[in-house]
Image (cartoon, coloured by chain):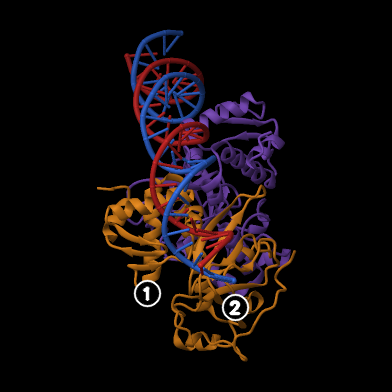
Chain colours: A purple, B orange, C red, D blue
Amino acid sequence: MDQSVRARIPLSACQVACSDCSVHRICLPGGLKAQDLGDLDHRLVAQRRKVARGESLFHAGDRFDSIYAVWTGFFKTSVASRDGRDQVSGFQMCGDLVGLDGIGTRRHEIDAVALEDSQVCVIHFDELEALLQDVPPLRQQFHRILSREIVRHQVQMLLLGSMYAEERLAAFLIDLMRRLQDRGYSPSAILLRMSREEIGSLLGLTIETVSRIFTKFQSEGLLSVRNRHLGICNPAGLHRIAEGRPN
Amino acid sequence: MDQSVRARIPLSACQVACSDCSVHRICLPGGLKAQDLGDLDHRLVAQRRKVARGESLFHAGDRFDSIYAVWTGFFKTSVASRDGRDQVSGFQMCGDLVGLDGIGTRRHEIDAVALEDSQVCVIHFDELEALLQDVPPLRQQFHRILSREIVRHQVQMLLLGSMYAEERLAAFLIDLMRRLQDRGYSPSAILLRMSREEIGSLLGLTIETVSRIFTKFQSEGLLSVRNRHLGICNPAGLHRIAEGRPN
DNA sequence: CGCGAACTTGAGGCGTGTCAACCCCTGTGG
DNA sequence: CCACAGGGGTTGACACGCCTCAAGTTCGCG
């Protein structure tokens, strides 16, 4: 079933200007000079699209025609194997790109689901290709993003292949803190958008293990846990754990 | 220490023609029409470089100025964490690109080491950028390759995060068979270029576990193991194991 | 031929998964 | 206002898959 024909709701009557966006520095236009940035307005982003909590932005197997930049909200992406197992491969927040998996085969290879009511900027890939031709700095930034995505995944493989559960969770929290800080949010007062199960899936752990480690970290004074509210009390301690030096 | 200044040995007095290369269909020029392909000759690949078994093509931290296409031989790439752990993130054979990790930061983020005496095509990234501007089909193929690399890593994360040791090894062998077949080699008579330790590192397993599973697979008639020579006797059985249905 | 590295095999321990019970919070409806 | 259901989260007991350690064997390269 091809889901890409579902309704797209233009949020604004007209089109979207990246130069007005508060996260453009982190997003696809990152690193562009003001003039190049202006050239993209009303060209890069065709429209915005709302995705309600729990709904899919796209499914594996859908025809690929756009990539998406998260504008507001929070997403997860997950890979599925033929036999039904699936695993969260990442969480995306504002400024992150989603859908790069579809470029190779012109079909999406993974699922993307909103973890809260969200809005994305729809970037038609054909239009992006034309802009990549016309705006070399945009092309370079696009390549940087693809490359960093590759590196990020390899670091995640290191985590999954050779770290203990406590190290994985500490590394996850550190990554989350850094990304929140990059976007101007507090890195120490965190509201988790995802369930324990989704964290566990990303880290290759069960829900019970994630829960136990949260409790342990709290008892050690590293953080305070109250439902999905986290307070980071000892970032240096988390860094030490993530690097395998718990003392 | 910046290693990128080590000697580069041009194999041919002149430059390299992709259109003469036997793996161009799998490599960066894949999907190009004959005419576009001809345009790349002597432009895409500046020179070839020999890398002896055990030597590095580049190290993490090296300045990035080129990507490499494997022409002959076999490589591994590996990620290292600050505390000394490292993990193999992939094996590359002829037609595969190495070095895409460096685009984002202009420094290589991982290590690449030859597992046998090898030769690579050196593609200066500045020159590639110019060609991507001039040859749209090349740009599209480059994006396809980057995207497929992203998907490949996410599938590997699924493997590391949610599969049993036997399933991982079966999936590894199936992937290897497919890639050998794509290149015109026999998928059933395999000479492993990597050690048990390197296989284990890729799969998040110890050398002992890999060895035990090879023995077990052999006793079950799935394959024959003799040192680094593998004979695949029952590909369908391997597929079943990789999909979690051992019976 | 000989040495060191790579590999195999076995015994035992540990980290994390599995299973089960229970708690808490939220929303729903009488 | 309370009863209830249901999902998400926590905690405990136990099982098991894989790692660790150790010994022995084989292979590959100088």
Q: Nearer the viewer, residue C19 or A3?
A: C19
Q: Position of residue A16 (x, y in %)?
A: 59, 57
Identify the residue at the far bottom of this view. Answer: B13
Bin the neighbour count of mark 1 within 10 Å (Cα to Cα): few under 14, some 14-19, many 20 and up: few
Q: Position of residue A125 (x, y in %)?
A: 50, 65
The disc labelled 1 sits on which kind of residue?
Tyr
Residue in view at x 37 percent, y 49 percent: B166
Q: Nearer the viewer, residue B54 or B19?
A: B54
Identify the residue at the far left of this view. Answer: B247
Residue in view at x 64 percent, y 62 percent: B104
Q: Position of residue B161 (x, y in %)?
A: 46, 46
Q: Which mark is residue B185?
A: 1
In the picture, measured across the screen, residue B172 lies left or right of residue B14, that is left
Q: In this orientation, does residue A227 appear?
A: yes
The chain letter for the residue carrying disc 2 is: B
Q: Is residue B170 above or below residue A74?
A: below
Q: Name the image quarter holding residue B10.
A: bottom right
Residue in view at x 31 percent, y 51 percent: B241
Q: Is residue A153 above or below residue B37?
A: above
Q: Position of residue A70 (x, y in %)?
A: 56, 51
Q: Quadrant of the C terminus of chain A?
A: top right
Q: Which residue is mark 2?
A: B50
